[in-house]
Amino acid sequence: SASSDEKDLVIIGGGVAGYVAAIKAGQEGLNVACIEKRGVLGGTCLNVGCIPSKSLLNNSHLYHQILHDTKNRGIEVGDVKLNLANLMKAKESSVNGLTKGIEFLFKKNGVEYIKGEGSFVNEHEIKVALNDGGETSVKGKNILIATGSEATPFPGLEIDEKRVITSTGALSLEKIPESMLVIGGGIIGLEMASVWSRLGTKVTVVEFLGQIGGPGMDTEVSKTIQKLLKKQGLEFKLNTKVLSGDASGEKVQLSVDSVKGGKEETLDAETVLVAIGRRPYTAGLGLENIGLETDERGRVTIDSEYRTKHPHIRSVGDVTFGPMLAHKAEEEAVAAIEHIKKGHGHVNYAAIPSVMYTHPEVAWVGQSEQDLKNQNIPYRVGTFPFSANSRAKTNLDTDGLVKMLADPETDRLLGVHIVGPNAGEMIAEGTLALEYGASSEDIARTCHAHPTLAEAFKEAAMATHGKAIHF
Ligand code: FAD
Ligand code: NAD
C-alpha cells in the first residue's frame, strides 16, 4: 500500500499541472504517486474548463451558422432544432474520452493514482482522506503542489450554479435562459456569453475596465472583437462596476455604477454569470502544518525553480504565479520534473500564447502595443486584414486582422495579435517565431501555402518592415 514506502515524488492535484508532472516523472523513471480528490483526472481544464467550453463553443457556433449563415453559400436548410441535452452529451463524451485517456497514460507510465483529498501532516508526509472512505498516508522525497484554482466569488451573491452561476454552471445549464448578465468581460465571460447568446439568450456583459478581453489583450484587437461580438447580439457595458447583487426576487438583480461614479442603475436577468477571475485553491491542504504561507492573492510562493521555502516541495500551475492557462501549467510541470531529475529546466514566460475561442478567435503572444508604449519601447507595426486574404474570402469569413510588432532597429519580432478565423491555430507560428528570435523579415521570406489563412500572417510580416503584396 501507499503507506509503507517513500515515493520519489508525490503530486497533490491531478489537473493539467499535476497529471503532466506525473506522466513526465514516470517517463523519467521516478517512483511517483498523484493524489486527486475530484474522482476524475484532468482538473478544471478537462472537466469544467478548456475542454467542455470548446465543445460548447464549437457546436453552438455550428448551430448559429446553420441558422444565419447558409443562404449566401447556396445551402438551404429546413427546420433547424436545437437539442440542448444532446449538445451537452456531445460535450460529456469529449470530456470522458480525454479524462479516461489520462488514466490510461498513468498506467502506461507507472503512476500510482490515489483518489482522495491530500493534506500535509509534515514536510514529507501527506495524509489522504480517500474518496471511497478511510484514510491512507504517503511519503515523498519530493512533493509537488498542483491544486489549481477556483472561481472568485462575488461578495453577497450566493452561487447556486442555476440562477447565479460560475463557468461551471454555464457549462451545464439544463435550459436556455431568456436573459443573462455577465459580471466580467474577461475570457471566461466572453466565451460563455458567446455560447448562450448563440443559443438564443439575450446577454449583457458588464466590465469594469474600458476594454473587453482582460488587460492583456491588445486594445486595437479588443475594439475589433467587441464590434464583431456586438454584431452577433452581445451587449456591453464597459467602464461599469457591479456594486452588489440580489438573487432573492424572481429575477437576479445587479446594481451597477460607472467607474467614475454617479450613474447608478439596476439591471436584472434570469441568470447571472460571475466571471471576475479565478483564485488559487489551497483549502484543506494543511499548508499551516508545514509553515508555508501564501501571498496576498493566495498564491503559493516559489522561486525560479518552482521551490517553496522547503526545497523538496515545489508548486506549479494555477495555484502559483503567472497566467492561469493550461499550457503554462503543462510547461511548468515538465520544467519542475526536469529540475528534480536533472537539476535544470526552463519555461520562457515571454512566449506563452493566449487564445480566446470566440468567433472569430482572438490570439496573441508577446507584447501588446500598449505594453510597448507604457515601457517607451520603440516598435514598428504591420497589419493585414483577412478581407484581403483569399482563403478567408472563399470561406466567406473575412472579419479581423493580423497585427505584428517588431523592433525598428533589429526587426526582431516583439508581439503578434490576431483577431480572425483560426487565430488560435495561427498563433503557434507567432509563438515559434518569438521563441526562435525571428525578425519580421524571416517570417515574410518563409513560403506559405496558397490559399491559406496563414498567408495573412506572412503578409502582416511583410507589412511590418516593408509592404504587403495584397493590401
Ligand atoms: P486545476 O486544473 O484546477 O487542477 C487542480 C486539481 O487539484 C483539481 O482537479 C482539484 O480537484 C485537485 N485538488 C485540489 N486540492 C486537492 C487536494 N488537497 N487533494 C487532492 N486533489 C486536490 N486554459 C487554457 O489554456 N485554455 C482554455 O481554453 C481554457 N479554458 C478555460 C475555461 C474555463 C471555463 C475555465 C474555468 C478555465 C479555463 N482555462 C483554460 C484555464 C485552465 O483550466 C487552467 O489554467 C488549468 O486547469 C490549470 O491547471 P492546474 O492543474 O494548475 O489546476
Ligand atoms: P479575467 O481576470 O480574465 O477577467 C475578469 C474580468 O472581470 C476583468 O476584465 C475584470 O476587470 C472584470 N471585473 C472584475 N470585477 C468586476 C466587477 N465588480 N464589475 C465588473 N467587472 C469586473 O478572469 P476570467 O475571465 O474569470 O478567467 C479566469 C482565468 O481563466 C483567466 O486567467 C483566464 O486566462 C483563464 N481562462 C482561459 C481561457 C482561454 O485560454 N481560452 C478560457 C477561460 C478561462
Image (cartoon, rainbow, N blue to C red):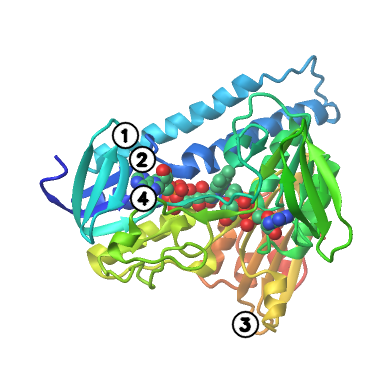
- Looking at the image, is mark 3 or mark 1 earlier in the sequence? 1
Amino acid at dot 2:
Lys
Q: Which of 387 and 44 is in front in this view?
A: 44
Residue at 79% of width from left, 26% of height from top? Answer: 67
Amino acid at dot 1:
Asn
Label annotation for residue 131 = 1
Q: Mark 3 points at which residue?
A: 410
Label annotation for residue 96 = none
Pointer 4 with pointer 3, Cβ within 8 A: no
> In the rendered image, is residue 453 in sight?
yes
Label annotation for residue 37 = 2
Crowding around mark 1 (Cα neighbors within 10 Å: few <14, some 14 to 19, many 20+) is some
Residue 276: where, in percent of width, then height?
65, 53
Pointer 1 with pointer 4, Cβ within 8 A: no
Q: Quadrant of residue 311?
A: bottom left
Which numbered disc, 3 or 1, marks the residue closer to the eye? 1
Residue 107: where, in percent of width, then height?
25, 37
Residue 175 vs residue 390: left or right? Answer: left
Residue 173: where, in percent of width, then height?
63, 29
- Looking at the image, is mark 1 or mark 4 earlier in the sequence? 4
Residue 259 vs residue 366: left or right? Answer: right
Q: Is residue 431 above or below residue 255?
A: below
- The reply to whether the residue tagged 2 has its Cβ within 8 angstroms of ligand 1 is yes
